[in-house]
Every structure is written in C-alpha cells, then in structure tokens.
Amino acid sequence: MDFKQIKANLKKDFTGLKKVKVAILADSSTQYLAQAIRGIGYEKKLDIEIWEAEYDAIDLTISDISSELYAFKPDFTFLFLSSSKLQKKFYKSGYSSDFSGDILEYYKKVTEVMSSHIKTNYLIVNFPDKLDSVFGHYAGKVNSSFSYQVKKINISLMDWAQNNAAVSIIDLCGLQAMYGNAFVTDTRLYISSDAIFSLDFTIKLAENCVQVLEAFTGGSKKCLILDLDNTLWGGIIGDDGLENIQIGDLGIGKAFTEIQLWAKALKDRGIILAVCSKNDEINAKEPFDKHPDMVLHSDDIAIFIANWSNKHDNIKYIQSVLNIGLDSMVFIDDNPFERNMVRQFLPEVLVPELPEDPADYLPYLNSLNIFETNAYTEEDKDRTQLYKAEALRNDASRSYTSEVDFLKSLDMISEVKPFDAFTIPRVAQLTQRSNQFNLRTIRYTEEDVKRIATDNNKYHTFSFTLADKYGNHGLIGVIILEKKDKEALFVDTWIMSCRVLKRTMEQFMLNEIVQYATRHKFKQIEGEYIETRKNGMVREHYKNLGFTAKDNKWILSIDNYDTKTCYITNA
C-alpha cells in the first residue's frame, strides 16, 4: 500500500468492522503513523479508532485525570519514544551509565499511572540501533556509549514484558535490521514535521502494528499448508527421483533448506503444518522418510495430502479435519497457476505471491510477518500431534455405522477444575484466539484472567481438558460464571475448541455448570449470545441445550433440568 491508498481507505465505510480503540503517546509527530494504522486496519476488517496525545506531552497527559485519554478508554496504548530524542537526553545526562535503567523506570511509571485509571494493553516500541559516531566500534566495550545503552534498554524492555502480561513489544529494532536505516529515516521530513520515519517505512511499521492488534483480536494464522516440488525442495520428485532433488548445503538447495527450517520452527511454536501437493503419495512422502538432508519429517506434518485433485478441494478437506477457519490458513506454492486457483475458490486463505527465485522465498516471507502472535504456551509445542490424532479419529469414524458407537469407542475423559497457575496462560490464549465457538467473544489478557480466577466472591471458573484413546487434546474448554446475585449465574465466557465438536463436550460442560449451581443453591443460569462475523455456528447453542429466550438473554431453570446425555467421563 501507499499513502494514496491509505487515505482512500480512511474515507470508506467502517460500519460492521470489529472495533478497536488505540491511543498513541509519543515524543514526536505520529499523525502519519495514525493514518496508516487506521487505513491498513480497514484492509484487515478492523475499525481502529485512534486518539493521539499532543506529541512530547506524555507526562502532562497521563497526570491529568480529566484528560481525553482516560475518557477515551483505549483497548491498546502505543508508547513511543524516538531514538533521536533519546540520544539527546543521553548526551545531556553526561553519558550516564544508569541511563537504560532510568528509561525502564520511566516506562514503568507511565504504565502504573495509566493503569490506576483505566485498563489497557501497552504496546511499547523499542529502539533502533545505529553505529556510534562518538565511540565508534569501541562502543561495545564501554557502558557510557549510547549504542551500549540502547541495547541494554531493549533487553530490559523484553525482560519486563515477559513478567507483565499487559505489556508487549513492537520490535522497531528488528524492522530497522530488515529494511535498513536509510529506508527507515527521512531527515528532511523529521526537520520539517518532527516525524521520525520516512513515509514508506511508516507504512511498514503500521502494517506490523496492525498485525499485533489483529493477533490480540483473534486474527492469528494457525496453519501453514505447503506445496512440495520447487517449494520444499528443488526439482520434481516424481521425475527427478530422491537422489536428484535439490536440498541441503549445496547451491540452490540452501534456499529450500532454509524454508524447511522456518517451517520447522513455526511447527515447534504451535503452527499446524500440512502438505497439499499434486503428486503420487508414495513419491511425495519418500523424501520425508529417506532423504538425509530433509529438515521436515513425517512427524512434523499434521495432514499430508498428495493426489491429483484440485488443490482448493484438498485445502477444504484439510480445513474440515482441522476445524479451523479458512482465514487462519496460509498456502505456499511456487506455481502461479495454483496460487491463483486457490485465491479464486478460497479467497479467505492467505496465499503469498512468492518471488520467482527460490533464494528470495524466505526473505520475502519473513518480511510479511504472517504468523504474528501475542501468546505462547508449552501446550503449543504439541499442536501437530493433536491434529495428527484427530486425523486418525476421522479415519476411525468411517468404520462405524453409528455415531453413538463411535463416540463410546473413544473412551473420552475430561479433567474439570478451576483456573490455576498452570492453566491461566492457556485460558487467556483461548479468549484471545477463539472466534467460532465463542458465545460472547470477550477478550481477556493473562492479567485479567488472574484477577477473575482469584475473585471467588464474583466469579467461578472452569477449565476442561479432553483425552481419548488416540491422544490428549489438552485444555479445550473455558467457562467463566459471574455470580449476579444469590439465585442467578451469568455465563460471562463459554469457549470450546472446534476440534472437539460433535463429541458431546458442550453437553458435558453444561452438566458440570448445573452441578455447581445445584450445590451452591442457584436457581437459574443466564446465557448471552453476542454475534460476530465468525461465531454464527453457536447462534443456536443455548436453544439447543434447552435454554429459553427472554429479554435478549437465554435462561435455564435448575429445578427443571434433565442431565444431558454425553459420552465423556469426569477424570
């Protein structure tokens, strides 16, 4: 995009788009960045409403309780100090070796003051580095150099963010390394308008900021679907044979090895890998099992599809097995025809336009930052095995003529317990990422979940796991009950992973809620469905479970409840 397209987007109708409120506090001009964030947000179906503080007035803004900032109540607050002005402060400090600590304390103070008045997530922009013109390369050996202090600041910000769920880092330093300082800055624009960045880089920064917002609001990509020939290796396995495909440390093989290393790292982070190739399956699988230079192996691939059907039909099959949205899938293929076919038939799927030269594949994919995330848990590492087990279940289900017989054969067990220190990170992740089986789509940070979990007077929480003879799904369900009064429980949050649909899990979850309500002498349960673009599948959820509609709510009387039939045992 360019600023002409961005300004055109600003004039379009944002009605119906997901609303996000963003405040920007900075020590320099951010008007171009604000315009770019809102205009790019439109492309991502986000209505990003932005409030900008007067620049270089952060302290004044946060200290004024009656300021527009607090009335605005932003969901996210960008905090941005420019490296240029930071350097001036450093020089004025007399090259203080404590400078990095002072900056960290300043950020802590700003967030503490704001958090005492509003609840917001903080997106803090770190600092680009540059060659030190005072100490030169000796800067790395002296802690009173600006280069040394900038590096310390960036490390200290990361350490702080790891221990503060409300704080995230926008990696401006990494973006500078990718695009180069000459592209990042425009000294003439800075002198004339106090805007730190060039207009072209402002767009790149805004794109990354919007990707972070998108991840927080449930827009993360979850699955990478890979072609094989001339995508994961050079050559055509069916024609060239195992010994002649290009992969490894020689020539262009390096480029394909790097793509595999990237995909492997994504898989280890929790991205589901699938293969979709026009090939005979026996030929397509051979390199994964037998080639000594392959980085990816069969165990890394959740679903492996190699046949001569249309790729868009195969991708729809992959989606049906994974039970995730098409818009959370990415398809990578070297063939322009195949890419265009998938775009035409499955426009929700992201299909990057790969460069012609395989040497450029990975740099290009890295520049897109496709797989932005705002959370990572240990459970993410096992995601591929979860979906491989799901494929086995799908295969097994075909051998049963009765769905009930199949469900009974699974030997399903669920552990039910309130949120605890181990489940809180995963619960927060589910509230932020779940879109389809999500009755109200209320997003909670890890800090929010901790607060709810410890407020026993107001809330009761449930986390649900599910395991069967094929494997453990892990934590797949979340319910937060709000104690409205002595007689009524309100279902604040009901989330379930789509991979356990049609397992009678929702019936099992309702039975658990009713048992809790009965023990504590509540008379009714109240539910609410808030419609979004993606949760239409649960529109009839409460109706199907026997709730009665009343005043835009769904009511279930405990006295008249009949325990629902399900095929899951409580662990």
Image (tube, helix red, strand yellow):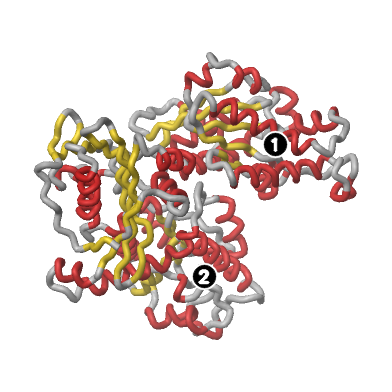
In x, y percent, where is residue 190?
72, 28
- Residue at 15%, 31% (x, y): give it: 550
Lower position in the chain sequence, tag 1 or tag 2 = 1
**Which of the pair 117/487 is nearer the observer?**
487
Label annotation for residue 568 = none
**Which of the pair 273/401 is nearer the observer?**
401
- Image quarter (top left, top right, bottom left or bottom right) of the C terminus: bottom left
Disc 2 marks which amino acid?
Leu
- Residue at 49%, 40% (x, y): give it: 447
Q: Quadrant of residue 464?
A: bottom left
- Residue at 42%, 41% (x, y): give it: 454
Disc 1 marks which amino acid?
Leu
- Looking at the rendered structure, the secondary structure element under dot 1 is helix
Q: Is residue 333 left or right of residue 131?
A: left
> Mark 2: few, some, or many residues within 10 Å (few <14, many ≥20)?
many
In x, y percent, where is residue 91?
85, 31
Question: Disc 1, disc 2: CB below 8 Å?
Answer: no
> Mark 1: few, some, or many residues within 10 Å (few <14, many ≥20)?
some
Q: Quadrant of residue 534?
A: top left
Q: Is residue 209 left or right of residue 151?
A: left
- Looking at the rendered structure, the secondary structure element under dot 2 is loop
- Residue at 28%, 44% (x, y): give it: 535
Q: Is residue 131 above or below residue 474?
A: above
The answer, for residue 323, to whether it is visible in the render is no
Q: Which is more foreground, mark 1 or mark 2?
A: 1
- Residue annotated with mark 2: 232
Q: Is residue 191 above or below residue 100?
A: above
Q: Is residue 484 left or right of residue 215?
A: left
- Residue annotated with mark 1: 104
The answer, for residue 60, to whether it is visible in the render is yes
